Protein backbone atom coordinates (compact mmCIF):
# COMPACT_ATOMS: atom_id res chain seq x y z
CA UNK A 1 0.00 0.00 0.00
CA UNK A 2 1.45 3.36 -1.08
CA UNK A 3 0.86 6.33 1.20
CA UNK A 4 1.59 9.78 -0.18
CA UNK A 5 2.03 13.11 1.61
CA UNK A 6 1.82 16.21 -0.60
CA UNK A 7 3.45 19.48 0.45
CA UNK A 8 0.94 21.79 2.14
CA UNK A 9 0.09 24.78 -0.03
CA UNK A 10 -2.04 27.08 2.14
CA UNK A 11 -0.22 30.36 2.94
CA UNK A 12 1.27 30.35 6.46
CA UNK A 13 0.84 26.57 6.73
CA UNK A 14 4.08 25.00 7.83
CA UNK A 15 2.90 21.62 9.11
CA UNK A 16 3.32 18.35 7.24
CA UNK A 17 1.07 15.29 7.25
CA UNK A 18 3.78 12.85 8.36
CA UNK A 19 7.08 13.54 10.08
CA UNK A 20 10.05 11.17 9.65
CA UNK A 21 9.27 9.34 12.92
CA UNK A 22 5.75 8.60 11.66
CA UNK A 23 7.15 7.43 8.33
CA UNK A 24 9.44 5.01 10.16
CA UNK A 25 6.44 3.59 12.07
CA UNK A 26 4.49 3.09 8.84
CA UNK A 27 7.42 1.52 7.02
CA UNK A 28 7.82 -0.87 9.95
CA UNK A 29 4.17 -1.85 9.51
CA UNK A 30 4.91 -2.73 5.89
CA UNK A 31 3.59 0.36 4.10
CA UNK A 32 5.40 2.20 1.31
CA UNK A 33 5.55 5.96 1.95
CA UNK A 34 6.24 8.80 -0.48
CA UNK A 35 6.60 12.51 0.32
CA UNK A 36 6.49 15.44 -2.05
CA UNK A 37 9.95 17.04 -2.25
CA UNK A 38 10.37 19.74 0.37
CA UNK A 39 7.12 18.72 2.07
CA UNK A 40 8.59 18.73 5.58
CA UNK A 41 11.03 21.59 5.19
CA UNK A 42 8.93 24.22 6.96
CA UNK A 43 8.55 21.84 9.91
CA UNK A 44 12.30 21.29 10.11
CA UNK A 45 12.48 17.96 8.23
CA UNK A 46 14.68 17.62 5.17
CA UNK A 47 14.04 15.21 2.31
CA UNK A 48 17.13 13.30 3.46
CA UNK A 49 15.51 12.75 6.90
CA UNK A 50 12.50 11.19 5.18
CA UNK A 51 14.70 9.01 2.99
CA UNK A 52 16.54 7.83 6.05
CA UNK A 53 13.18 6.92 7.61
CA UNK A 54 12.35 4.83 4.53
CA UNK A 55 10.29 7.18 2.36
CA UNK A 56 10.77 8.01 -1.30
CA UNK A 57 10.77 11.62 -2.46
CA UNK A 58 8.49 12.65 -5.33
CA UNK A 59 8.72 15.77 -7.46
CA UNK A 60 5.80 14.86 -9.75
CA UNK A 61 2.73 15.77 -7.67
CA UNK A 62 0.04 14.79 -10.18
CA UNK A 63 1.59 11.38 -10.90
CA UNK A 64 2.17 10.68 -7.21
CA UNK A 65 -1.45 11.54 -6.36
CA UNK A 66 -2.59 9.23 -9.16
CA UNK A 67 -0.50 6.31 -7.92
CA UNK A 68 -1.19 6.65 -4.20
CA UNK A 69 -3.50 4.29 -2.34
CA UNK A 70 -3.82 6.70 0.59
CA UNK A 71 -3.19 10.46 0.55
CA UNK A 72 -2.45 12.21 3.84
CA UNK A 73 -2.68 15.98 4.18
CA UNK A 74 -2.98 18.42 7.05
CA UNK A 75 -5.22 20.98 5.31
CA UNK A 76 -8.17 20.40 2.99
CA UNK A 77 -7.16 19.44 -0.55
CA UNK A 78 -7.78 21.68 -3.52
CA UNK A 79 -10.79 20.29 -5.39
CA UNK A 80 -8.74 19.91 -8.60
CA UNK A 81 -6.21 17.75 -6.74
CA UNK A 82 -8.94 15.50 -5.33
CA UNK A 83 -9.82 14.57 -8.92
CA UNK A 84 -6.26 13.35 -9.50
CA UNK A 85 -6.60 10.51 -6.98
CA UNK A 86 -7.45 7.09 -8.35
CA UNK A 87 -10.87 5.48 -7.72
CA UNK A 88 -10.83 3.21 -4.68
CA UNK A 89 -8.02 5.13 -2.96
CA UNK A 90 -8.25 6.73 0.49
CA UNK A 91 -7.64 10.22 1.80
CA UNK A 92 -7.39 11.66 5.29
CA UNK A 93 -6.66 14.94 7.06
CA UNK A 94 -8.66 18.08 7.83
CA UNK A 95 -11.37 18.49 5.18
CA UNK A 96 -13.51 21.41 6.41
CA UNK A 97 -16.68 19.37 5.80
CA UNK A 98 -19.10 22.08 6.94
CA UNK A 99 -17.37 24.80 4.94
CA UNK A 100 -16.98 23.18 1.55
CA UNK A 101 -19.62 20.79 0.20
CA UNK A 102 -17.91 20.99 -3.20
CA UNK A 103 -14.87 19.16 -1.81
CA UNK A 104 -17.03 16.37 -0.41
CA UNK A 105 -18.69 16.03 -3.80
CA UNK A 106 -15.28 15.96 -5.48
CA UNK A 107 -14.20 13.04 -3.27
CA UNK A 108 -17.41 11.17 -4.11
CA UNK A 109 -17.05 11.89 -7.83
CA UNK A 110 -13.44 10.67 -7.80
CA UNK A 111 -14.46 7.44 -6.06
CA UNK A 112 -12.15 8.23 -3.15
CA UNK A 113 -12.98 7.11 0.40
CA UNK A 114 -12.46 10.26 2.48
CA UNK A 115 -11.75 9.84 6.20
CA UNK A 116 -12.34 13.29 7.65
CA UNK A 117 -10.17 14.13 10.67
CA UNK A 118 -12.69 16.64 12.08
CA UNK A 119 -15.25 13.85 12.38
CA UNK A 120 -13.20 11.28 14.30
CA UNK A 121 -15.59 10.27 17.13
CA UNK A 122 -14.85 11.62 20.58
CA UNK A 123 -14.51 8.25 22.25
CA UNK A 124 -11.82 6.90 24.53
CA UNK A 125 -10.72 4.45 21.82
CA UNK A 126 -10.38 7.14 19.14
CA UNK A 127 -8.77 9.78 21.36
CA UNK A 128 -5.30 8.93 20.08
CA UNK A 129 -6.53 9.65 16.52
CA UNK A 130 -8.15 12.98 17.37
CA UNK A 131 -6.43 15.67 15.33
CA UNK A 132 -8.75 18.44 16.57
CA UNK A 133 -7.65 17.81 20.16
CA UNK A 134 -3.94 17.46 19.51
CA UNK A 135 -3.85 20.68 17.50
CA UNK A 136 -6.17 22.64 19.81
CA UNK A 137 -3.89 21.81 22.72
CA UNK A 138 -0.93 23.45 20.96
CA UNK A 139 -3.10 26.37 19.80
CA UNK A 140 -4.08 27.06 23.42
CA UNK A 141 -0.43 27.13 24.45
CA UNK A 142 0.52 29.36 21.52
CA UNK A 143 -2.38 31.72 22.19
CA UNK A 144 -0.97 32.64 25.58
CA UNK A 145 2.68 32.62 24.55
CA UNK A 146 1.87 34.92 21.61
CA UNK A 147 -0.17 37.27 23.80
CA UNK A 148 2.59 37.35 26.43
CA UNK A 149 5.10 38.33 23.79
CA UNK A 150 2.86 41.10 22.45
CA UNK A 151 1.71 42.48 25.82
CA UNK A 152 3.32 45.68 27.07
CA UNK A 153 3.82 44.08 30.47
CA UNK A 154 4.99 40.86 32.09
CA UNK A 155 2.73 38.07 33.37
CA UNK A 156 4.14 37.05 36.77
CA UNK A 157 4.15 38.97 40.00
CA UNK A 158 7.62 40.31 40.78
CA UNK A 159 8.80 41.71 44.08
CA UNK A 160 11.96 43.68 43.48
CA UNK A 161 13.88 46.46 45.26
CA UNK A 162 12.38 48.77 42.63
CA UNK A 163 8.89 47.83 43.68
CA UNK A 164 6.25 45.18 43.21
CA UNK A 165 4.68 44.25 39.89
CA UNK A 166 1.20 42.74 40.11
CA UNK A 167 0.46 39.60 38.09
CA UNK A 168 -1.23 40.10 34.72
CA UNK A 169 -4.91 39.25 34.46
CA UNK A 170 -5.84 36.72 31.80
CA UNK A 171 -9.42 35.88 30.83
CA UNK A 172 -10.01 32.68 28.88
CA UNK A 173 -13.37 32.30 27.11
CA UNK A 174 -14.19 28.72 26.14
CA UNK A 175 -12.69 25.93 28.21
CA UNK A 176 -12.35 23.02 25.82
CA UNK A 177 -9.02 21.50 24.89
CA UNK A 178 -7.47 24.82 23.75
CA UNK A 179 -8.92 26.79 26.66
CA UNK A 180 -7.62 24.36 29.27
CA UNK A 181 -4.13 24.53 27.81
CA UNK A 182 -4.37 28.34 27.65
CA UNK A 183 -5.28 28.43 31.34
CA UNK A 184 -2.47 26.05 32.28
CA UNK A 185 0.07 28.04 30.24
CA UNK A 186 -1.01 31.39 31.66
CA UNK A 187 -0.84 29.95 35.18
CA UNK A 188 2.66 28.56 34.51
CA UNK A 189 3.70 32.07 33.45
CA UNK A 190 2.39 33.44 36.72
CA UNK A 191 -0.78 35.20 35.56
CA UNK A 192 -4.01 35.48 37.52
CA UNK A 193 -6.55 33.62 35.39
CA UNK A 194 -10.32 33.67 35.09
CA UNK A 195 -12.30 31.54 32.65
CA UNK A 196 -15.83 31.04 31.39
CA UNK A 197 -17.60 28.34 29.39
CA UNK A 198 -21.27 27.69 28.68
CA UNK A 199 -20.74 24.10 29.83
CA UNK A 200 -20.82 24.31 33.64
CA UNK A 201 -19.16 20.87 33.87
CA UNK A 202 -15.78 22.49 33.24
CA UNK A 203 -15.85 24.49 36.48
CA UNK A 204 -13.93 21.81 38.40
CA UNK A 205 -11.27 21.56 35.68
CA UNK A 206 -10.80 25.35 35.73
CA UNK A 207 -10.40 25.34 39.51
CA UNK A 208 -7.99 22.43 39.45
CA UNK A 209 -5.67 24.53 37.27
CA UNK A 210 -5.64 27.31 39.85
CA UNK A 211 -7.96 29.61 37.91
CA UNK A 212 -11.30 31.15 38.83
CA UNK A 213 -14.47 30.04 37.05
CA UNK A 214 -16.67 33.00 36.16
CA UNK A 215 -20.37 32.37 36.69
CA UNK A 216 -22.80 34.05 34.32
CA UNK A 217 -26.45 33.05 34.40
CA UNK A 218 -27.54 32.64 30.77
CA UNK A 219 -30.21 30.01 31.35
CA UNK A 220 -30.30 26.49 29.91
CA UNK A 221 -27.13 25.51 28.01
CA UNK A 222 -25.74 21.99 27.77
CA UNK A 223 -23.63 19.82 25.52
CA UNK A 224 -24.03 17.29 22.72
CA UNK A 225 -23.35 13.55 23.00
CA UNK A 226 -19.85 14.22 21.65
CA UNK A 227 -19.19 16.78 24.41
CA UNK A 228 -19.55 19.85 22.18
CA UNK A 229 -21.34 23.02 23.31
CA UNK A 230 -24.84 23.71 22.03
CA UNK A 231 -25.49 26.93 20.16
CA UNK A 232 -26.85 29.78 22.30
CA UNK A 233 -29.86 31.90 21.42
CA UNK A 234 -29.14 35.56 20.52
CA UNK A 235 -30.62 36.56 23.91
CA UNK A 236 -28.23 34.20 25.72
CA UNK A 237 -25.26 35.56 23.78
CA UNK A 238 -26.28 39.09 24.83
CA UNK A 239 -26.53 38.05 28.49
CA UNK A 240 -23.11 36.44 28.22
CA UNK A 241 -21.58 39.60 26.73
CA UNK A 242 -23.03 41.70 29.55
CA UNK A 243 -21.62 39.27 32.12
CA UNK A 244 -18.16 39.31 30.54
CA UNK A 245 -17.80 43.04 29.78
CA UNK A 246 -16.44 43.99 33.21
CA UNK A 247 -13.95 41.11 33.29
CA UNK A 248 -12.70 41.99 29.80
CA UNK A 249 -12.22 45.65 30.75
CA UNK A 250 -10.01 44.61 33.65
CA UNK A 251 -8.02 42.01 31.71
CA UNK A 252 -4.55 42.41 30.22
CA UNK A 253 -5.07 39.41 27.95
CA UNK A 254 -8.27 37.82 26.67
CA UNK A 255 -8.01 34.49 24.86
CA UNK A 256 -11.17 33.35 23.07
CA UNK A 257 -11.55 29.72 22.05
CA UNK A 258 -15.36 29.39 21.90
CA UNK A 259 -16.54 27.15 19.11
CA UNK A 260 -19.78 25.39 18.28
CA UNK A 261 -19.09 22.28 16.20
CA UNK A 262 -20.42 22.59 12.66
CA UNK A 263 -21.49 26.22 13.07
CA UNK A 264 -19.93 29.65 12.76
CA UNK A 265 -18.18 30.72 15.98
CA UNK A 266 -20.31 33.05 18.15
CA UNK A 267 -19.25 36.72 18.35
CA UNK A 268 -18.72 37.17 22.07
CA UNK A 269 -16.58 40.31 22.26
CA UNK A 270 -18.17 43.31 20.59
CA UNK A 271 -16.34 46.43 19.43
CA UNK A 272 -17.85 48.20 22.44
CA UNK A 273 -16.37 45.64 24.85
CA UNK A 274 -12.97 45.95 23.14
CA UNK A 275 -13.18 49.74 23.40
CA UNK A 276 -13.57 49.29 27.16
CA UNK A 277 -10.21 47.51 27.41
CA UNK A 278 -6.95 49.18 28.43
CA UNK A 279 -4.64 50.41 25.62
CA UNK A 280 -1.82 47.89 25.27
CA UNK A 281 -3.98 44.93 26.21
CA UNK A 282 -4.14 41.92 23.89
CA UNK A 283 -6.96 39.77 22.58
CA UNK A 284 -6.14 36.46 20.90
CA UNK A 285 -9.01 35.04 18.87
CA UNK A 286 -8.38 31.32 18.47
CA UNK A 287 -11.69 30.96 16.63
CA UNK A 288 -10.52 33.33 13.86
CA UNK A 289 -10.68 30.70 11.11
CA UNK A 290 -14.23 29.74 12.05
CA UNK A 291 -15.51 33.33 11.79
CA UNK A 292 -14.01 34.64 15.03
CA UNK A 293 -15.28 35.31 18.56
CA UNK A 294 -14.25 38.94 18.38
CA UNK A 295 -15.74 41.79 16.40
CA UNK A 296 -12.82 43.26 14.47
CA UNK A 297 -10.79 40.06 14.11
CA UNK A 298 -9.15 39.75 10.71
CA UNK A 299 -8.20 36.16 9.99
CA UNK A 300 -4.43 35.63 9.72
CA UNK A 301 -3.75 39.22 10.80
CA UNK A 302 -2.94 41.26 13.83
CA UNK A 303 -4.82 44.54 14.13
CA UNK A 304 -4.53 47.35 16.66
CA UNK A 305 -7.72 49.29 17.35
CA UNK A 306 -7.80 53.10 17.49
CA UNK A 307 -7.85 52.73 21.27
CA UNK A 308 -4.64 50.66 21.22
CA UNK A 309 -6.03 47.17 21.85
CA UNK A 310 -4.24 44.49 19.86
CA UNK A 311 -6.43 41.77 18.30
CA UNK A 312 -4.52 38.72 17.07
CA UNK A 313 -6.48 36.64 14.57
CA UNK A 314 -3.81 34.37 13.19
CA UNK A 315 -5.50 31.19 12.02
CA UNK A 316 -4.18 27.85 13.25
CA UNK A 317 -1.68 29.19 15.77
CA UNK A 318 -0.44 25.62 16.17
CA UNK A 319 1.08 25.92 12.69
CA UNK A 320 3.56 28.35 14.27
CA UNK A 321 5.10 25.45 16.14
CA UNK A 322 5.14 23.16 13.11
CA UNK A 323 7.61 20.58 14.39
CA UNK A 324 5.51 19.59 17.37
CA UNK A 325 2.20 20.21 15.61
CA UNK A 326 3.28 17.89 12.78
CA UNK A 327 4.57 15.33 15.27
CA UNK A 328 1.18 15.23 17.03
CA UNK A 329 -0.82 15.33 13.79
CA UNK A 330 1.23 12.54 12.23
CA UNK A 331 0.98 10.41 15.37
CA UNK A 332 -2.84 10.77 15.24
CA UNK A 333 -2.86 9.60 11.61
CA UNK A 334 -0.49 6.68 12.22
CA UNK A 335 -2.59 5.64 15.23
CA UNK A 336 -5.63 5.51 12.95
CA UNK A 337 -3.81 3.47 10.31
CA UNK A 338 -2.20 1.14 12.84
CA UNK A 339 -5.56 0.48 14.51
CA UNK A 340 -6.99 -1.02 11.32
CA UNK A 341 -3.81 -2.31 9.64
CA UNK A 342 -4.08 -5.99 8.64
CA UNK A 343 -0.38 -6.56 7.99
CA UNK A 344 -0.44 -5.39 4.38
CA UNK A 345 -3.11 -2.82 3.93
CA UNK A 346 -5.78 -0.57 5.48
CA UNK A 347 -9.05 -2.44 5.00
CA UNK A 348 -11.97 -0.02 5.10
CA UNK A 349 -14.23 -1.57 7.74
CA UNK A 350 -17.37 0.42 7.03
CA UNK A 351 -19.20 -1.24 9.93
CA UNK A 352 -16.63 0.01 12.47
CA UNK A 353 -17.78 2.88 14.74
CA UNK A 354 -14.68 4.99 14.15
CA UNK A 355 -14.85 4.59 10.38
CA UNK A 356 -18.59 5.16 10.35
CA UNK A 357 -18.06 8.36 12.32
CA UNK A 358 -15.53 9.92 9.96
CA UNK A 359 -16.14 8.38 6.51
CA UNK A 360 -17.52 11.10 4.25
CA UNK A 361 -17.49 9.37 0.89
CA UNK A 362 -17.16 5.79 -0.33
CA UNK A 363 -17.86 3.91 -3.55
CA UNK A 364 -18.66 7.10 -5.44
CA UNK A 365 -21.29 8.27 -2.91
CA UNK A 366 -21.49 10.67 0.03
CA UNK A 367 -22.12 8.17 2.81
CA UNK A 368 -21.95 10.25 6.00
CA UNK A 369 -25.44 10.79 7.42
CA UNK A 370 -24.80 14.46 8.22
CA UNK A 371 -23.63 15.34 4.71
CA UNK A 372 -25.77 13.06 2.51
CA UNK A 373 -27.79 15.03 -0.01
CA UNK A 374 -31.46 15.28 1.04
CA UNK A 375 -33.96 12.92 -0.56
P1 LIG B 1 -14.63 23.22 20.87
O1 LIG B 1 -13.34 23.50 20.17
O2 LIG B 1 -15.80 22.82 20.03
O3 LIG B 1 -15.05 24.54 21.68
C1 LIG B 1 -14.19 25.12 22.61
C2 LIG B 1 -14.94 25.46 23.87
O4 LIG B 1 -15.79 26.59 23.64
C3 LIG B 1 -15.85 24.36 24.41
O5 LIG B 1 -15.48 24.06 25.72
C4 LIG B 1 -17.24 24.97 24.33
O6 LIG B 1 -18.07 24.53 25.38
C5 LIG B 1 -16.93 26.43 24.44
N1 LIG B 1 -17.98 27.35 24.01
C6 LIG B 1 -18.87 27.26 22.99
N2 LIG B 1 -19.68 28.34 22.96
C7 LIG B 1 -19.29 29.15 23.98
C8 LIG B 1 -19.73 30.41 24.46
N3 LIG B 1 -20.75 31.06 23.91
N4 LIG B 1 -19.08 30.93 25.53
C9 LIG B 1 -18.05 30.29 26.13
N5 LIG B 1 -17.61 29.09 25.72
C10 LIG B 1 -18.22 28.52 24.66
O7 LIG B 1 -14.46 22.20 22.05
P2 LIG B 1 -13.32 21.10 22.28
O8 LIG B 1 -12.09 21.75 22.73
O9 LIG B 1 -13.25 20.29 21.06
O10 LIG B 1 -13.88 20.25 23.50
C11 LIG B 1 -15.23 20.03 23.77
C12 LIG B 1 -15.33 18.97 24.87
O11 LIG B 1 -15.03 17.69 24.35
C13 LIG B 1 -14.38 19.18 26.03
O12 LIG B 1 -15.07 18.91 27.23
C14 LIG B 1 -13.32 18.18 25.83
O13 LIG B 1 -12.71 17.77 27.04
C15 LIG B 1 -14.10 17.05 25.20
N6 LIG B 1 -13.25 16.17 24.40
C16 LIG B 1 -13.42 14.81 24.51
C17 LIG B 1 -12.63 13.96 23.74
C18 LIG B 1 -12.78 12.47 23.83
O14 LIG B 1 -13.54 12.01 24.64
N7 LIG B 1 -12.10 11.70 23.01
C19 LIG B 1 -11.68 14.47 22.88
C20 LIG B 1 -11.54 15.86 22.78
C21 LIG B 1 -12.34 16.69 23.55
Image: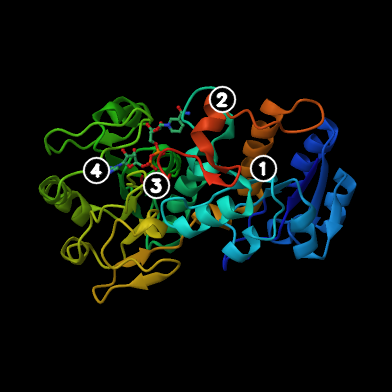
Q: What residue sits right under mark 4 in the picture?
A: 231
Label 1 Cα neighbours within 10 Å, binned few <14 / some 14-19 / many ≥20? many
Q: Is residue 22 left or right of residue 97?
A: right
Q: Earlier in the sequence, mark 1 or mark 4?
A: 4
Location of residue 351 with respect to 106 vertically, above or below = above
Instruction: Determine the secondary structure under disc 3.
Output: loop
Camera-nearest label, 4 or 3: 4
Question: To which residue does mark 1 refer?
Answer: 330
The 10 Å Cα crowd at callout 4, few under 14, some 14 to 19, many 20 or more, is some
Name the residue carrying label 2. 351
Left or right of 162, for residue 214: left
Disc 1 to disc 3: CB gap under 8 Å: no
Horizontal side, residue 200 vs residue 314: left or right? left
- From the viewer's perspective, is residue 35 above or below residue 113? below
Mark 2 touches mark 1? (CB < 8 Å): no
Horizontally, residue 215 falls left or right of residue 25, namely: left
| Dot in front, 1 or 4 | 4
Q: CA distance from mark 4 to mark 2?
A: 31 Å
Q: Which of pointers 1 and 3 indicates the residue nearer the eye?
A: 1
Residue 249: give x, y in percent of width and height: 19, 56
Q: CA distance from mark 2 to mark 1?
A: 25 Å
Instruction: Give the x, y percent position of residue 349.
Output: 63, 28
Residue sticking out furthest to the bottom = 306
Q: What is the number of the mark on residue 156? A: 3
For this orientation, the residue located farthest to the top is 124
Amino acid sequence: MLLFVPKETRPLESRVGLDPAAVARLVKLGAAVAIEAGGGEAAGHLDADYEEAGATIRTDLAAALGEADFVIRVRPAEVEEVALQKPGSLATGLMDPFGSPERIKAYADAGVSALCSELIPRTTLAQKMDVLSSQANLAGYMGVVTAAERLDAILPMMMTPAGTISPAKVFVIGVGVAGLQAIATARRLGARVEAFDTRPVVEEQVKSLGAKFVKIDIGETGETEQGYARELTPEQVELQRQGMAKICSGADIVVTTAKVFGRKAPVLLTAGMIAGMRPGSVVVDLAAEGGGNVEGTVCDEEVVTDAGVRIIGWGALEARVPRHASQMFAANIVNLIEHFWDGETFPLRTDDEIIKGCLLTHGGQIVHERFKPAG
